[in-house]
Amino acid sequence: MTAAGVALHARGLGIAFGALRALDGVSLALEPGARQALIGPNGAGKTTLINLLTGVLRPASGSITLGGLDVTRHGSDRRARAGLARTFQVNALFPSLTPLQSVLLALCEREGLGGAWWRPLRRQSALFDEAHALLARLGLGPLAGTPVAALAYGSQRLLEIALALATRPRILLLDEPAAGVPAGERVALFEVIAVLPADIGILLIEHDMDLVFRFARRISVLVAGRILAEGTPEEIAADPRVRAAYLGPAHG
Ligand SMILES: Nc1ncnc2c1ncn2[C@@H]1O[C@H](COP(=O)(O)OP(=O)(O)OP(=O)(O)O)[C@@H](O)[C@H]1O
């Protein structure tokens, strides 16, 4: 992979919380259209890594580039404008808005329309079309007018993905999209994740190994703040160090 062909490149990231070295020399490269997963036991440092990638935290060492642009010292907003989007582990939706209103707000934010989203009229209708198309893509079309609070949890997680896609990202970080989603709603979630736009590079952080092994073309394994292994799902499933540290005998 040439440097120009890498959409997101983290090199040698390190950060400590007091005496705890939460991440130590972590490197990760995502190419455009990547389908990569980040797995590891509780406390391995996955959320900390996402926080470094998105600019919520600053690394003590290392660097991060987005499409060749060094964003190591940039805040979350500039990284978002450079094409990085994330979903959140904790539900962060407005319960009284509908999915249509939620997506429209995100689109207006992207377009810099702020509170004046009802004008001009022609732009408004283009944004409505885009919002409906996005909701249809995620299987939320029939629920476009239902208040978020009345949606099933799996649908709320899908809406979070819609809001991230509304920013037209080059890189999407999916932070535990299946967490808390009941078994019966997982199939729909998995189906949508499988058909996300091919040109967006995706990094999935997930404990559900069914989803990870269905989705990922590459897997990085983080253990105690270091990358223990990286490879294809077959390589990771067969790696004795990964089995010992995380997977157990079930995947292989
Ligand atoms: N703000 C903080 N202050 C102090 N310690 C922290 C902070 N954030 C994370 N840690 C510690 O850093 C380590 C890595 O935590 P992190 O949340 O990144 O792990 P994780 O892999 O995301 O875990 P999980 O799978 O449970 O979400 C843990 O030991 C955690 O307790």
Image (cartoon, rainbow, N blue to C red):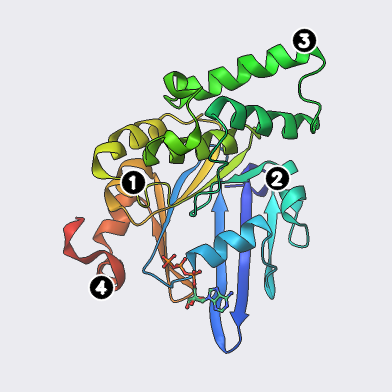
Q: Residue at x 42, y 29 (%)?
A: 195
Q: Nearer the viewer, residue 42 or 242?
A: 42
Q: Position of residue 19 (x, y in %)?
A: 57, 89
Specify the amino acid type for callout 2. Ala
Label 1 sits on a secondary structure element that is loop
Label 3 sits on a secondary structure element that is helix
- Above-or-below relation of 7 to 21: above
Q: Is mark 4 within 8 Å of ligand 1?
A: no
Give the side of residue 107 with respect to residue 209, left or right: right
Residue 27 in sight from this viewpoint = no
Tell me how far mark 1 sits from mark 3, CA to CA.
38 Å
Give the side of residue 142 with respect to residue 109, left or right: left
Specify the amino acid type for callout 4. Ala
- Above-or-below relation of 58 to 101: below
Q: Residue at x 26, y 64 (%)?
A: 247
- Residue 100 occupies quadrant: top right
Residue at numbered disc 2: 80
Q: Position of residue 39 (x, y in %)?
A: 39, 60
- Residue 167 occupies quadrant: top right
